[in-house]
Amino acid sequence: MARSPLSPFSPGFWRSPLRGTWFTSVLGVVLLGGITLLFVTGLLSYAAYNPDLSPVNDKTPDKGILGFYLFSWPTDPHWLYRLNQGVHVTLGITLIPVLLAKLWSVAPKLFTLPPARSLTHALERISLLLLVGGALFEFVTGVLNVQLDYLFPGSFYPLHFYGAWVFFTAFVAHAALKTPLALRNLRRLREERTEPVAPEPAAPTVSRRGALWFVGGGSLLLFLTTAGQSFDGVLRRTALLAPHGGAEPGSGPGGFQINKTAAYAGIDPAETSEEAWRLVVTGRGGTVRLSRADLLRLPLHSAALPIACVEGWSTSDQWWRGVRLRDLAALVGYEGDPPDVFVESLQRRGAFRRAALRANQVADPRSLLALFVNGEDLTPDHGHPARIIVPAAPGVLTTKWVARLTFGDL
Ligand SMILES: Nc1nc2c(c(=O)[nH]1)N[C@H]1C(S)=C(S)[C@@H](COP(=O)(O)O)O[C@H]1N2
Ligand SMILES: [Mo]
């Protein structure tokens, strides 16, 4: 047998007998479905931010046509964002072994020489570069965001969003070219009859089917240690790999997941006291300043709504109680048809201290400036003295430690 050459550019370098059209086709078909669903849930996640209420929610400069949106994000069903983002993040993490196995199975192709035999071949290889680079970029930025709590504050979002367009464009071209072949391979070829791509294959140590079980087992393990972060109690404890897995932060009314604590956000308790804190509400009818006692004299309403973060974790429904946003709009000149609102927190630095909500969200009777949760005053970490809560909206729009509401078309 010939000695294995050292350079990956020589075909004899690649020895695994597992690489072959059947193996690649099975993984390819799984990714075709999985990545399409990732892209759709990702776009919906973007729409859920109300990106057109810019530059507040989507701060990307010159976003052009890729920053399009087609509809006002609905407020029903109230768990819509929770489901969408749970699927997006859990599926993305579950697909990692499949993606890696697929890249491994076609790795020799990335090293073929000459780099381009013709113009078409050159174009195909450039598109592969965008495909592989785009896939790695999207999965790495996604995992970093989920695991490392916004490693690059503010910039994850445009990176992951515009990276998705690059990746998905290459993915569509690749799928259009290869899907018919992959499906034909799966119909015609049986695993045993596939020729290995290696010209000098080593002796197999595991069957192709066995290798697929290994990949699938890896995915299952990731799924089982991630999915629980979208649930409370016992299930959350199974989410060993998720930052918001494990135990709840304490018990009692405020004993559900916390994104940023009051201390982290630099909220000075002196500013949130009964005497110091005033809510400033502005609209076409003027400005009113309300203490917490003033708010408590307004009609109070309850709504059972979850917190669902872009990172994929969520809580079950919590019981919020407070003043309807549309009632606050009515105080400053919008009787009946509330407009958009711009919300600002007491927080001075960092992300997520300002957010815009669209008119349909303000109008929903379950959209509250919450003062209580689960029957008690909000805890400092959940936004005392007042926070926004809106059905079906991403957590990032539910501003805590609210200081100012400005109603008007944005
Ligand atoms: N002022 C302020 N509000 C905020 C945040 C923040 O960092 N600062 N984080 C937001 C994000 S990203 C989420 S997911 C929710 C989390 O709410 P919780 O900590 O009560 O679970 O609060 C939102 N409101
Ligand atoms: Mo979040």
Image (spheres, grey):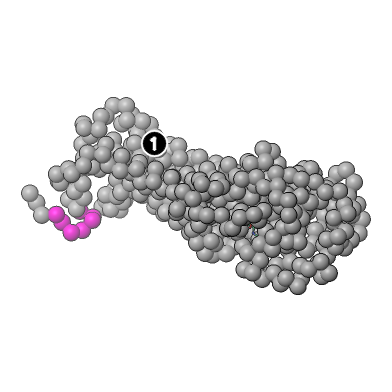
As drawn, is 393 to the left or to the right of 176? Answer: right
As drawn, is 263 to the left or to the right of 204? Answer: right
Q: Give the dominant element type of the magenta stretch: helix, strand or loop.
A: loop
Please provide the residue range marked out in magenta.
4-11
As drawn, is 25 to the left or to the right of 225? Answer: left
Q: Position of residue 332 (x, y in %)?
A: 89, 54
Rendered image quadrant of residue 154: bottom right
Residue at 57%, 62% in the rendered image? 155
Which element carries disc 1, helix, strand or loop? helix
Residue at 57%, 64% in the rendered image? 153
Residue at 67%, 58% in the rendered image? 382
Residue 134 or residue 16, whichever sits in front: 16
Judging by the rendered image, the residue that carries numbered circle 1 is 29
Circle count: 1
Mark 1, other Cα within 10 Å: few <14 / some 14–19 / many ≥20: some
Residue at 85%, 63% in the rendered image? 291
Q: Position of residue 8 (x, y in %)?
A: 23, 56
Q: Position of residue 84 (x, y in %)?
A: 57, 43
